[in-house]
Amino acid sequence: MSSPPLLRGTPPPAAPTADRPADPFGTELPRSGAELSHVGAEQPRGGSELSRGGAERPRGGAELSRGGAELSRGGAELLETVTRIREHIVTMCASAEGGHLGGSMSLAEILAVLYFRVLRHDPRFPGMPDRDILLLSKGHGGIGLFATLCEAGYFPAGELAAYARPGSRFTAHPHPGIPGVEMPSGSLGHGLAVGVGHALAHRLEGSGRRCFVVMGDGELQEGSVWEAASVASAHRLARLTAIVDRNGLQISGPTESVGALEPLADRWRAFGWRVLEADGHDTDALTAALSAAPDPERPTVLIAHTVKGKGVAKIEGQARSHFARLGRRQQQQLLQALRADAEARR
């Protein structure tokens, strides 16, 4: 890693210059969300909730802008953002390093809703003290997180194009040297415990901040997840929300064959959590679930039912899409399939 972690509160890196590496595939990458025009009308935002002091504060990026344009995005615009996120993912998987394709594709709507409708954050100031916390515990979804942060304006697409090249800070898994990344991940089962620590710290500070932890379903086979779940419930960490990317597959096959998780919702309830379930590719359903006011007596888990490899029919629901190193022709085929899927959904 050539770049040291960003100090808390420092601004994102400067825009790319002419000597920065170009797209290694000779194709134009989708532009950063900060460079894209937004619709003029005010967009729907996440719901409001009561802070610890009883005062209501708005959720989402409503008051946080970049270049005068609001981060919050409406239906059609958010779906277009989701498509661009998946295009970034495919392009990174066409690098010499390759990438975790299927599990990043299944996260696209979840991450888009969080960053463009729910989280309190500012890409101009990644370390702002009152930001909400997003922890990607399933680190093999890292390129999905990078793509989303790029679209939110944390760094330009030109820098993302250098993924996995010598000297680039973008590697297969997230680390705090990347603006907007709160913790390193890759080894599974640690994110929820870190989230418990954040939630406890926020309570001690008297803060109204929320903490969201995104996990894979195969990750729930780690005992450390359930230890953290027990502690969160015992301390009534109302502002902690876990999100399970329930695509039903892990690297070695279906989760129910490798280490059965069902009845998953009942397991979480047995640990004292409020359980919500939603279609993980329905942005409106995700927005409603993730914007809901916390239960004051217990943490919340959202089980998001997703499809591994979502967006490209030929790889959807297949364990072999877990990791891919795409050739140029495969890259173009997948990009075309993504655009066709986006057109069909309009």
Image: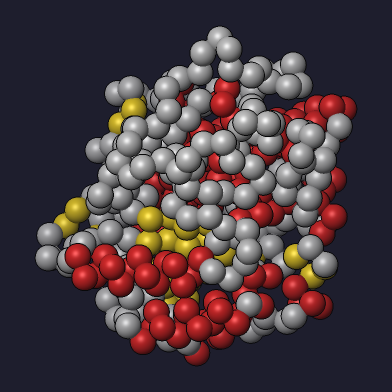
The outermost residue toward the top is 18
> Which quadrant of the rendered structure holds the N terminus?
top right
- Residue that appears at 51% across and 36% down: 3
Q: Is residue 285 left or right of residue 221?
A: left
> Which quadrant of the rendered structure holds the C terminus?
top right
- Residue that appears at 67% across and 46% down: 172
Up the image or down, 21 lies above or below 298; here it is: above
Image location (x, y in percent) of residue 291: 36, 57
Image location (x, y in percent) of residue 163: 65, 33
Up the image or down, 24 lies above or below 148; here it is: above
Residue 18 in sight here = yes
Q: Nearer the viewer, residue 344 or 164?
A: 164
- Residue that appears at 47% across and 63% down: 213
Up the image or down, 261 lies above or below 96; here it is: below
Image location (x, y in percent) of residue 316: 78, 51
Residue 345 in sight here = no
Q: Nearer the viewer, residue 325 or 109?
A: 325
Image location (x, y in percent) of residue 60: 33, 47
Q: In which quarter of the image is residue 333?
A: top right
The outermost residue toward the bottom is 270
Q: In which quarter of the image is residue 152?
A: top left
Q: In this view, does 63 lie to the left or right of 114?
A: left
